[in-house]
Image: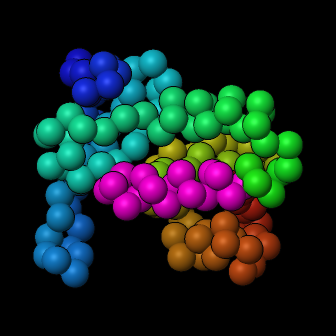
Amino acid sequence: MEYNKKNQAFTKEGFFRIKEVEGIVEYCRVKFFETGNQLVFPHDVVKSLDFEDIIVVEEAIHRKAQIEITNEDDFELEMRELHHELKSEGVIVVPKITATNPKGDEIIVSDLEAFCDENSLDLEAVQAVLEGKQKTHKKWKFTV
């Protein structure tokens, strides 16, 4: 177990590379001990230990929002700004996705690509459901 600069315990769950405009970029999937949250960060950010668990940050903003923000639209704006700020810092926010199978059972999905492979689903079609472009894919429903 390792600790980041915020003294949050984590383990490295795996590495992968993505070809981006600037070339091949290596990423690391990190699992935080306290929350069980899994996030993906660029490998150099993980190496520098200069990252933190988004759940902890979101909870702090949510607590602040409960005190200061009474308008739901303002809260949504705050959350979008937070996600934009984290993305600009190289943090990839992995949303919690709920899949509802044709029988009506709900499943929390942490790795959408692996989930699609395991259930013979098309990743692009599932993303279209998540974006609201279609209602279902092979009778499966998905929500964030």
Please say if 50 is above or below 89.
Answer: above
- Quarter holding residue 138: bottom right
- The image position of residue 77, as x and y in percent, is 68, 58
- The image position of residue 37, as x and y in percent, is 47, 33
* Color theme of the render: rainbow
Q: Is residue 102 visible?
A: no
- The N terminus, quarter of image: top left
Q: Is residue 41 visible?
A: yes
- In the image, 16 versus 81, the foreground residue is 81
- Residue drawn at x 37%, y 61% is 88
Task: Specify the farthest residue to the front.
Answer: 68
- Residue drawn at x 74%, y 43% is 106
Is residue 82 part of the magenta span, yes or no? Answer: yes
- The C terminus, quarter of image: bottom right
> In the drawing, does residue 111 fall left or right of residue 68?
left
> In the drawing, does residue 98 fall left or right of residue 22?
right
- Residue drawn at x 68%, y 49% is 98
**Which segment is the magenta one?**
76-92
